[in-house]
Image (tube, coloured by chain):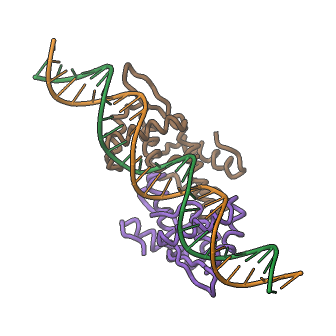
Chain colours: A purple, B brown, C green, D orange
Amino acid sequence: MQPTAPELEILKLLWQQQPQTGRELHDQLADVLDWSYSSTRKTLERMVDKGLLQLVQQGNQNSYAALVAKVPTLAALAQDFASRVLELKQPLPLAMFADSALLSAEDLQALEQQLQQLERGDEPC
Amino acid sequence: MQPTAPELEILKLLWQQQPQTGRELHDQLADVLDWSYSSTRKTLERMVDKGLLQLVQQGNQNSYAALVAKVPTLAALAQDFASRVLELKQPLPLAMFADSALLSAEDLQALEQQLQQLERGDEPC
DNA sequence: TCATAGCTGCGACATTTGTCGCATTTTTTG
DNA sequence: CAAAAAATGCGACAAATGTCGCAGCTATGA
């Protein structure tokens, strides 16, 4: 089960800084999605229901944290793109990810292992 | 507007051999989708409605041909993956596509141009 | 203290996608 | 020629996604 485009935007924001409130996430999403506050919160609610996020109560205010990790999620998306779109037999080369601002050097190492696991058909952790 | 996963499978079959009847496409899809014949035909109908396919009357039998070209479609999917998932600023390197069985040497050349256009924000043709 | 602003829980509706069925027509086969 | 098989047009329903509203509660500010 892969995140949709808006869900991925939210996850990327949380992987950078978590937890965050609905309002904080909504304000940052304004750059990419022309949504109302209600739309953002409904999506957050659905992501909690789907197991992508968890609710973190801070006082009487809701905050959200990612339940899925960055590297396995990105690895799964990359593997899906490689096999479904390009019909490649091997995972994408690591060099492709090197310029991504989302990934640190540690992330790249972990990603390499994830992609190898996916190539063998293992489920990522 | 991008093709969904099943729609892309159908397009890939047609890019290899077109036009094809619904039955021919359905038989080949059995490898990747566990669908009934009704499901396949409904999807084909929707793809015609969406402008992805055109109906080709062969005698009294329906055949389908792709209305969207392989290279611009794959370029758009690649560009979307690069920017939305990896947040890369440059298009994916051409080397990544070299191992794809979908793409001939000519396709790779055309793809290079497409990706450069997409990088500049142009719409692919 | 009260009005205003912000947050919450939940509902609502439209569209898209997933998936298959049925009646009818046409083609094929015996 | 008739029965069986295949194809067609269209309908149907569920789930997912897109998108926003409202009533009520809490926090803030004047």
Give the camera-side residue of A102 and A4.
Answer: A4
Residue drawn 35% across the image and 49% down it:
B33
Residue drawn 48% across the image and 57% down it:
A82
Q: On the rendered structure, is B26 left or right of B125?
A: left
Q: Position of residue B42 (x, y in %)?
A: 41, 39
Classify the position of the N terminus of chain A by image quarter. Answer: bottom left
Q: Is residue A118 visible?
A: yes
> Would you place residue A119 above or below residue A65 in this image?
above
> Would you place residue A86 above or below residue A29 in this image?
above
Q: Position of residue A73 (x, y in %)?
A: 50, 69
Classify the position of the C terminus of chain A by image quarter. Answer: bottom left
Q: Position of residue D15 (x, y in %)?
A: 42, 58
Tell me the quarter of the picture where residue A114 sits. Answer: bottom left
Q: On the rendered structure, is D15 left or right of A20?
A: left
Tell me the quarter of the picture where residue B17 sits. Answer: top left
Q: Is residue A15 visible?
A: no
Tell me the quarter of the picture where residue D28 sits. Answer: bottom right
Give the camera-side residue of D1 and B23.
Answer: D1
> Would you place residue A20 above or below residue B89 in this image?
below
Give the camera-side residue of A63 and B8.
Answer: A63
Residue drawn 37% across the image and 34% down it:
B22
Q: Position of residue C29 (x, y in %)?
A: 16, 24
